[in-house]
Image (tube, rainbow, N blue to C red):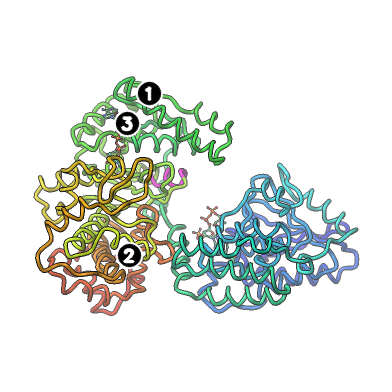
Amino acid sequence: MVVTLTRDGDLMVVTVDNPPVNALSQALRQGLLDAVATVESDPKVRAAVLHCAGRTFIAGADIREFGSPSQPPHLPDVIAAIEGTGKPWVAAIHGSALGGGLEVALGCAGRVARAESRLGLPEVTLGVIPGAGGTVRLPRLIGMETATEMILSGKPIDAERARAKGLVDLVTEGDPLPSARTLARSLSETPPHPLSRRPCPDVEDGSGFWEGREATLNAKGAGQEAPLAALKALRSAATRPFDEAMGIARSAFLALRDSTQAKALRHVFLVERGAGSDPTLADIPPRPIESCGVVGGGTMGAGIVAALLEAGLPTRLLERDEATLAQGLNRVGRILDGAVTKGRLAPELAEARRALFSGTTDARDMADRDLVIEAVFEDLDVKRTVFRTLDKVLKADAIIATNTSYLDPREIATATTRPDRVIGLHFFSPAHVMKLLEVVPLPETAPDVLATALALGKRLRKIPVRTGICDGFIGNRILRILRREAESLLLEGATPSQVDAAMRAFGFPMGPFEAQDLGGLDIAHLDRRRLAASCAPAASWAPLGDALCDLGRLGQKTGGGWYDYRQGDRHPHPSPTVEELVAARRTATSDRTFSAEEIQNRIIPAMVNEGFHILAEGIARTPGDIDLVEIHGYGFPRWRGGLMYHADQMGLDRIRGALVNRADPSLAPSPLLDRLTKEGRTLADLNAPPAAAE
Ligand code: T1G
Ligand code: NAD
């Protein structure tokens, strides 16, 4: 039974128990409706308390039911029944009250939340809008501005803010149930006016509130349907009677539920839940990690330290000398200070993290560490020296990880006597922010080391994706193709601004040239030099990028890269120097213009094709893994479902069609793409690990 009732004197305690997250399945909706009838019909009962068993309150509608037609009882009716009873219900909230779960709580007369609870309406992150009253009841309770902010961002708020905003009546340190009982009894004396019958506050007229929000959504979230639909539903809540506005929201929800974007976002939601879980490791418990070390406190090392401290892991930084150590310590300090300044971290928590952090220039001080992550210069000899030293000082079962972007971790590991305890942990910059973590086991890596690395990824609240060993792993390998395609478009007549605008219109937060200028052109340039030395002409091809580096144009940090930058202004300005440089290298016949769609249809199929090679080589185990890498590491628009999911939506024959006539032989359709199109199959068929190589 997903709903059980326990009478407690004049109260009915309604307990929901539908693991893992008490999602509002059809059975639960029916159970709640039956509970309303029972409470209603029991003369001895004056009020009810709704609480949940397990780790969380109701976490929303059952997303797994979205793929099939919605079955009665429908949630709006269940909530209307709870709100419409003459006997007040009080929700006792712990864990997460999200989506339909918060909408149920809004149908109750009162809400009590445990201190660590989170409350929110994240529907837009799933490509839908609150479909059971969130857009009409929430503004009536907490005001239109805060309701709009919560619904458009989809971000939950904590219990204390919820209380301050009037969303919950009370916050308890411990179990909220006793206080909920007390509140229910007092509300049965003076039942409050149901939200549906209260006036809905509008924003100050002429404030430009709605227009401003719409403009921001069109600028920031260009292409996404749900946020605009949510804004429309909120506006109708402010201007129309409750039932009419409820109807508008419900139809919008039902229409969006089966939309391409909602399906894509559900795909991402589900592959994210699978990230880091590996059936082959089901019986291998991760090793306990109680202390960590990081070698190299530069751009990446400092971010990695901050991520480890955030997870409560005591961390020691090893640097070359006192000067670089001081720089590393300061970098970490600035990250913590920045989080406090932005209100993302309480000062006392920052102090607690500082207390977990220490630095040294003596490798012997790393002897007691369970895991050490190396983030020194991207130079094989430097990394091998560090690994050799660590191998000597660390305890036998300690794990050593490398954050290398392009080097082969096997070549680094041979500097040790413990390749079975070596693994690649490829973080993304800034490492304390970016959610992606490429986990790169060696053939020798022991299963418990891999299990530990994947578990650490989750502990750091990252998206760990297992990847095989090749040049650039999954993400940087596809990035190389994106950049190469972007450069070839310049040689055929396009401009950096046109290419960047096209990719932003596709949904990337930044175009490839703007992104290079931000991160610096030198990292990839050094990598291409390395590749050229190992005779990989196609992979090292970037004549324009190399020419810019030779001119010292490394991006924003040098005041110019693909664009020019003015002092103190990070806005990219088209550069006459770059125009000249590109014009000088254009082949005579190639001075044509490109539409945004043409640019997208050049770049995306080339990236997808590389994804197929990566899948066929077993570097990525599922197309979903590539989707996670592209979304969480490279800004691929989440609402398109990720690179490979999007390819399926485009149609593999269209992808193949965009590649077959390309002059560049390295863009010939991959045999796996050929085979799937010939067999009329899709990538979705491959989300179970694919058969062996091409
Ligand atoms: N429906 C079905 N399954 C769900 C689910 C849901 N809403 N939420 C989580 N799961 C599964 C998940 O797939 C995983 O399964 C397991 O629960 C544990 O999840 C009408 C339309 C609640 C904060 O967007 O944010 O309500 O992999 O690993 O880290 O207006 O899950 O074990 O098989 O994430 O502790 C709105 C989504 C729905 C909340 C828990 N609700 N969930 O995090 O565990 S739309 C949401 C979460 C809606 C109404 C609309 C998180 C969590 P498995 P987990 P966690
Ligand atoms: P960085 O130059 O900013 O920092 C490297 C740090 O390592 C310096 O502080 C240096 O003093 C220190 N160091 C060098 N040799 C050392 C030694 N023997 N012992 C201790 N410390 C030593 O470099 P970064 O950008 O942080 O890159 C570090 C690693 O991370 C590289 O392998 C790089 O490929 C990889 N990576 C970089 C990025 C990025 O965007 N920068 C992203 C992912 C991975």
Q: Residues within 10 Å of mark 2 (few under 14, many from 20)?
A: many
The image quadrant that residue 653 belongs to is: bottom left
Disc 2 versus disc 1: nearer the observer: 2
Is residue 85 shown in magenta?
no
Q: Amino acid at mark 2?
A: Ala
Q: Amino acid at mark 1?
A: Ala
Q: Position of residue 149 (x, y in %)?
A: 60, 57
Q: Residues within 10 Å of mark 1 (few under 14, many from 20)?
A: some
Q: Eyeballing the image, is 312 above or below 169?
A: above
Tell me: 23 left or right of 558.
right
Q: Residue at x 59, y 77 (%)?
A: 70
Range of the magenta residues?
453-460
For label 3, the SS is loop
Query: Which residue corresponds to mark 3?
Result: 296
For label 1, the SS is helix
Query: Which residue corresponds to mark 2?
Result: 502
Q: Position of residue 25 (x, y in %)?
A: 61, 69
Tell me: 11 left or right of 277.
right
Is residue 456 shown in magenta?
yes
